[in-house]
Amino acid sequence: MAVPRRTPLPVAVLAAIGAAFVALPLMALVVRAPWSTAGHELSSSGAWTALRLSIVVSACAAGLAVTFGLPLAWVLARSELPGRAVLRALVLLPLVLPPVVGGIGLLAALGRNGIAGRLLSAVGIQLPFTAAGAVVATTFVSMPLAVLAAEAGLRSLDVRLEHAAAAMGASRWYVFRRVTLPMLRPQLGAGLVLVWARALGEFGATITFAGNLAGRTQTLPLAVYQTRVTDPGGAVLISLLLVALSLIVLVALRERLFTR
Amino acid sequence: MSLSVDVRARRGSFAVEAAFDAEPGETVALLGPNGAGKSTLIATLAGIEGPERGRVTLDGEVLDDAAAEVHMPAERRPVGVVFQDLLLFPHLSALENVAFPLRARGMAHGEARRHAAALLERLGVSERAEARPRDLSGGEAQRVALARALVHEPRLLLLDEPLSSLDVRTRARTRALVRRELAAFSGVRLLVTHDPVEAMSLADRMVLIEDGRVTQIGTPGEVREAPRTHYAAELVGLNFFTGRLERLEEGAGRIVTADGEVVVAWPEELEAGTEGVIGLLPPADVALHVVRPEGSARNVLRGHVAVVSVEGERARVRVDSSPPVVAEITLGSVSRLGLAEGAEVWASFKAVEVQVLPP
């Protein structure tokens, strides 16, 4: 059936407005950036330190989110656990929760006087207002995306392949390592990129739980927020840095991870 | 030196019971409708699940013995499986697929690959060793799946619906390939299928399974001659009646079935009142009429045309009479008599045309 694919006019107009809506602020950033003093601005505003911290924090968070998200997705997709619907709602809640609420919750739980925080303090572990705390806050917010991606992958996987592997004498661990995991790679890859992107932009939970300490917990979004007041041009530059970083990772990982 | 199976296996609320033997060099087909319990039996023989009761032995070696709580795990079983739809791993090359059972059993990487490569060579697909399954043709994929089933030198080869996923053209060619490979395998060969053509063309013996039990065991010839159940009769294209044998006048009797009766020539060796007597009737011996026929045929049944299925120049017409019968007539007769579905029709056949078998 060769139906000519002419885009209807209202669709084209609305799509153009939508695209412009996304593109305009990005273009404005490019236009307004103080290019002549860019190098000086970036180093004086501590952007490079924040960049390094952002990369480390978001990478750790993405790793943790997938490490715990995949087993969670397994339980949600495959176990007969009663109350799975409740568990799913709970696990996905950070996705819709205002991040600042997540930060408050983390403080109540893991803060110095929090219910679990006291135990951690007793063994000398401090999470609030540390880089590790920034990782915890970021993981909290971005893990639902890993769970969603992995669960979708598990559900679309042909379980007969796993059964076949078992019938060929593969242990459960071997089946997981050689069949399940490689076949989930596209979904896990997509999940990893989403999680990482979300982690890179995390603001609310991080500033609440880990604070905004330059050189220790100040990630790029926090640096933008702080610089904005004193140095608008610098804020624009750091924002562009974030945009560039996000774009590079999205493009680079797309080739490697989305195709089998 | 043979496979001996006598088990009850369970999957969920469904249980299948089966007892049969198979000799090396013999192809035995487990034939039954979908949901009869064939895949449950495969899972048991492959060692994925233990049987609820009973024993499985291969060449005198116990694979399962529920009473003695013996269960040999899948990785130690000398069993190879060609799965329905082949189930090649899409993310592995042909060679890695074939090496998989060896690797799963703990063989070193290089050695497993050498074994796999040698087998692909023997099966004539070595030039496709590095290809992914999605890039293989139907016949190549079949060979790779077979190599994967044979690579650990099993003594029992299970083929689960080996041709069901193929289109008609590939199927004929692949059937020949499967037949050659079966002949080259010296162990016990077990073919699981719901396709009677597949079973009859590939098997030396057939084990018919219905609703979780074995209903008949015999060579394709024996099943063709004397099917024991409605399902078996349908497989070989015969009308099937079963019920109590009653005496009519001299030389004649009738089989009273659950939904009617059929007049038959009196079988000398049987006694009146015998239950479960079987009557077989070739569809070609059934005549159809649009008005009630007067003649020597003792069986005249009224009904409506339920289904007309065309096979070449002939048509099989199912009539919902009591009992229902299938008639095979020419396409010309179908149009001449105006046999559309739902039309009223009379089916007739002579008593002597019904072959009567003891229960």
Image (cartoon, coloured by chain):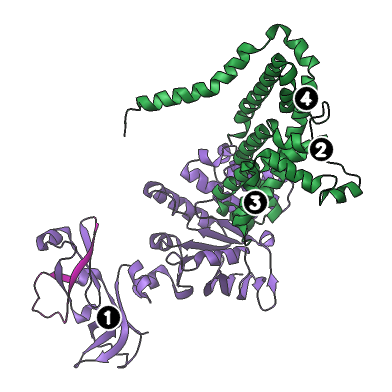
Position in image of residue A112 (x %, y %): 85, 45
Find disc 4 in the rendering and name its residue. Answer: A50
- The first of marks 2 and 3 along the sequence is 3
Q: Residue at x 54, y 62 (%)?
A: B189
The chain ID associated with circle 1 is B
Q: Is residue B308 magenta?
A: yes
- Mark 3, residue position: A90
Q: Label 1 belongs to which residue?
A: B259
* Snapshot quadrant of residue A144: top right
Q: State the green chain.
A: A
Considering the whole magenta stretch, tell me its main secondary structure: strand
Upstream in sequence: badge 3 or badge 4 = 4
Whole-Å distance between the Cαs marked 4 and 2? 15 Å
x and y, in percent, of residue A158 in the image: 55, 50
Residue depicted at x 37% and y 76%? B229
- Helix, strand or loop at disc 3? helix
Q: Residues within 10 Å of mark 1 (few under 14, many from 20)?
A: few
> Alpha-carbon distance for marks 1 and 2?
79 Å
Front residue of B300 and B149: B300
Image colour for chain B is purple
Q: Is residue B294 left or right of residue B105?
A: left
Bin the neighbour count of mark 4 within 10 Å (Cα to Cα): few under 14, some 14-19, many 20 and up. many
Amino acid type, label 1: Asp
Give residue A132's mark: 2
Horizontal side of B123 relative to B232 (left or right) equals: right
| Rendered position, B279 above or below B204 | below
